[in-house]
Amino acid sequence: MAQPGCGTDVSKATLTGSLQPCQETVGGNWNGWIAPEGLSPNHLKKAKLMFFYTRYPSSNMLKMFFSDVKFNRCITSQLIKWFSNFREFYYIQMEKFARQAINDGVTGVEDLSISRDSELYRALNMHYNKANDFEVPERFLEVAQITLREFFNAIVAGKDVDPSWKKAIYKVICKLDSEVPEIFKSPNCLQELLHE
């Protein structure tokens, strides 16, 4: 029988649990709060916003930035799965827009750019920042443009006939992660970030 929070998607069991004040310091207690057993919708939103900085976070990084969660194998797996799903959506959009550009007659990567007004940016922003209440870092636009151009070049070169053609792109993009701002380490970072 699967444990709550061990699913591959965001189930009701995964999104339960809330912080409870703690009067004394005991095991599992962080900064006067007992860590919840599961992940909440706010944890999902925080993870989505972190994706603007890091596409490939390590489990140690996740533990640092989700210090209000009581980590176990299932919680770690769920967070890693979230980022895997975020990457899957990101890369699907990149391939789709690269193929669309080729079909529209674009012949060179210099003609491909991503701005805050572009359709691709709007699709990504809507997915990771649905309420549009977070200022997406400029570096994310740069990384997205590099990713789009990598897909474009690979498709134009016919590399997409190889079943593992995307692996070379993943190796490039994984090196472009940025430092996640320290404010994301705070359990209250959403209130701080979204109400500035």
Image: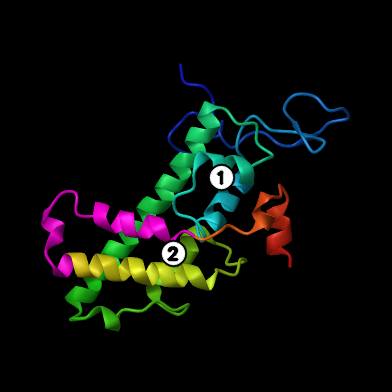
Q: Secondary structure at mark 1?
A: helix
* Amino acid type assigned to the residue bearing label 2 in the image: Leu
Q: Secondary structure at mark 2?
A: helix
Is most of the magenta stretch helix, strand or loop? helix
Q: For the point 73% across and 64% down, which residue is it?
A: 195
**Is any part of residue 11 visible from this angle?**
no
Q: Is residue 165 magenta?
A: yes
Where is residue 110? Give x, y as percent: 28, 82
- For the residue carrying disc 1, how many other residues have a C-alpha within 10 Å: few (<14), some (14-19), or many (20+)? few
Give the mark, 1 or 2, whose residue is nearer the N terminus.
1
Question: How many badges with numbers are in the image?
Answer: 2
Where is residue 47? Give x, y as percent: 55, 50
Q: Residue 154 sits in which quadrant?
A: bottom left
Q: Which residue is mark 2?
A: 124
Is residue 91 rendered to the left or right of residue 132? left
Is residue 121 rendered to the left or right of residue 181? left
* Amino acid type assigned to the residue bearing label 1 in the image: Met
Q: Which residue is mark 1?
A: 61
Answer whether labels 1 and 2 touch (C-beta < 8 Å): no
Q: For the point 63% across and 48% down, which residue is it?
A: 42
Give the answer, above or below, for where 180 lies relative to 24. Answer: below
Where is residue 190? Give x, y as percent: 68, 55
Query: Which residue reaches farthest bottom?
Result: 111
Q: Which residues are magenta?
A: 155-177
